[in-house]
Image: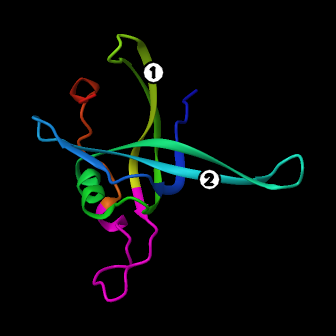
Amino acid sequence: MRGLNKVMLIGNLGADPEVRRLESGAVVAQFRIATTETYKDKSGNRAEQTEWHNIVVWNKLAEVAEKYLKKGSSVYVEGRIRSREYTDKNNIQRRAFEIVANTFQMLDRKPEGAAGGGGVAAAEADTVTDEPMVDDLPF
């Protein structure tokens, strides 16, 4: 039986994307988005819980992210969960979880007087091509 590894998130960027260009010519962008859940606690008071998600996009998507996404941008992200192990600066083995996005869509409205298509990058950013092998990852 095959598995399914699919994630869909809508959230806001906590900072501008960090973009790197690798020697191989690949472009990678990383950013974090916050998703907030609102619920009523045991006392009936409204409460919120915010989760932060690490997002990675490659090549054309990375270039679109660099050009259009900014801190506070509202974005829909679709991709898969990936975990990776690394050794931190104190020589401690750690595991990180991130979402490797294969598409995203900007949800912010277009600023008044701005040209273009409604603030949506779907036409430019629908698919990732030439995703590098794991050995090419810069982290």
In the image: residue 57, left or right of residue 50: left
Q: Residue at x 44, y 35 (%)?
A: 98
| Residue at image coords 83%, 55% | 45
Q: How is the image coloured?
A: rainbow
The magenta stretch spans residue 110:
yes
The boundaries of the magenta stretch are 104-124
- Residue 133 place in picture, x, y as percent: 25, 29
Measuring from the top left, give residue 54's x and y in whole percent: 44, 40
Q: Secondary structure at mark 1?
A: strand
Amino acid at pointer 1: Arg
**Helix, strand, or loop for circle 2?**
strand
Mark 2: amino acid: Thr
- State yes or no: residue 35 in magenta: no
The x and y percentages for residue 21 are 15, 42
- Is 114 displayed left or right of 80 in the figure? left
**Residue at (30, 49) in percent of width and height:** 128
Return the residue at label 1. Answer: 95
Q: Quadrant of the C terminus?
A: top left
Cα separation between marks 1 and 2: 24 Å
Where does residue 104 sit, x and y in percent of width and height? Answer: 41, 57
Q: What type of secondary structure mainly makes up the magenta span? A: loop
Q: Which residue is mark 2?
A: 36
Q: Tell which of 48 and 62 is nearer to you.
A: 48
Q: For this rendering, which residue is in front, 57 or 13?
A: 13
Q: Earlier in the sequence, mark 1 or mark 2?
A: 2
